[in-house]
Amino acid sequence: MKRRSARSILVRVDSYSSVNPNVTQLFSRLFFCFPLFTRFKTRSNALNIWNLLAAYLPDDLTRSMRSTYSPRFFTRCLHAALPNLCALCGCQSHSVICLQCDATYWHWRDFPLRCTLCALPLTTSAQRTRQTCDMCISSKPSFDATFTLADYVPPLDSLMLSLKFGAHLALGREFAARLARLAAARLDASDWPDIVVPAPLARNRLVERGFNQAWVIAKPFARLLRLPADATLITRSRSTAAQARLALEARPGNVEGAFVVTKPIHDWHVALVDDVMTSGATLQALARALKAAGARRVTNFTVLRTPRNIESDNLYLM
């Protein structure tokens, strides 16, 4: 098959545009949309391209396409055909994180031995034997287990900041896929969660940001595990100060009693999803509210875990 150059294709398009002037306008707009899609690969940009095609193609062909192919199918085709930019190094890649960065920075395949309750790395042989850190032994948290992908350290911290403050929502699906693989490998099949719930975001921050990053992760996570997900099962009963602006010792009191369970969950195993775990105060308050409402077990799934040696730096988060 003879390979055609871009110039020959444009010549053919230009010759056809004399018959249909809309073709030139269509291609000029598509050339503007495709770079946007390769940079962000979001559903909205894919839908923009879909709508452009539908606007300039014949009506009978448009109706046939809409009845045969969904926008999600069109999005998947663009994902397969167009390159993306790695969220860490910026190189072209067909995945959100390129293979090189995945092998270099993500060590979840060689999962370090962590506390089964709070997910902090275990440092002594005694801790590793009992699989629980000293802090959880002295004061057992309300949640029953915590799973995390990696520590909140550079450059992985930039991914979370990109999701939260840069609206790079494709990262939510990437984190969800990794958490789902971790859950499948680590969870006991006899005690599978009954529902997936995201950590609720304060109303003013939700209005300001436009989305809850925990829900962006929790929704595809639940879909991959074939579990129901509910973003309204637990809500905030009052406004609280941002945890990131408080000292570690002030965080538990800030969120104590701030959450209310809105639906019956008697004897349920709840999978609680959040982006980052630092002091654990928010997840502790959420687990306490869920247990008070009748939950049998609460398992935390967090993308990143702040190491103990930098918790006092108050870098961020929950």
Image (cartoon, helix red, strand yellow):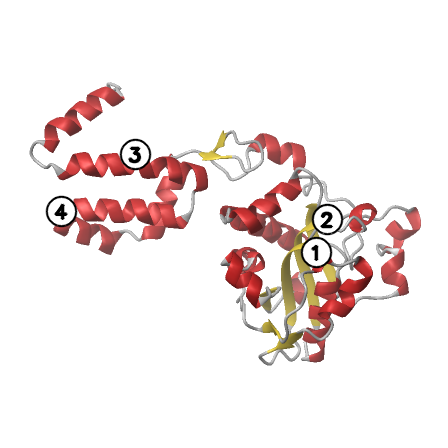
Q: Give the residue pinned by disc 1.
A: 244
Nearer mark to the viewer, of 1 and 4: 1
Rate crowding at label 4 as few (under 14), some (14 to 19) or many (20 or more) other CA atoms within 10 Å.
few
Which of 185/168 is in front?
Answer: 168
Q: Give the residue pinned by disc 2.
A: 315
The picture quadrant where one finds residue 133 is bottom right
The answer to the question of whether label 1 and label 3 lie on touching residues, with beta carbons closer than 8 A, is no
- The kind of residue on which mark 1 rests is Ala
Instruction: Using the numbered discs, state the Cα–Cα distance from disc 3 to disc 2 in whole angstroms.
Output: 41 Å
Q: Is residue 173 left or right of residue 314?
A: left
The picture quadrant where one finds residue 107 is top right
Q: Is residue 177 visible?
A: no
Rate crowding at label 1 as few (under 14), some (14 to 19) or many (20 or more) other CA atoms within 10 Å.
some
In the picture, the disc for residue 124 is none
Q: Give the residue pinned by disc 3.
A: 31
Q: Give the residue pinned by disc 4.
A: 58
Which of 212/288 is in front?
Answer: 212
Q: Position of residue 84 (x, y in %)?
A: 46, 35
Residue at the spot x=58%, y=35% of the render? 88
Nearer mark to the viewer, of 2 and 4: 2
Instruction: Using the numbered discs, state the Cα–Cα distance from disc 1 to disc 3 in whole angstroms.
Output: 42 Å
Instruction: Using the numbered discs, state the Cα–Cα distance from disc 1 to disc 4 in whole angstroms.
Output: 54 Å
Rate crowding at label 2 as few (under 14), some (14 to 19) or many (20 or more) other CA atoms within 10 Å.
few
Q: Position of residue 24 (x, y in %)?
A: 18, 34
Q: Is residue 123 left or right of residue 70?
A: right
Sequence-earlier tag: 1 or 3? 3
Q: Secondary structure at mark 3?
A: helix
- The kind of residue on which mark 2 rests is Leu
- The kind of residue on which mark 4 rests is Pro
Residue at the spot x=70%, y=60% of the render? 243
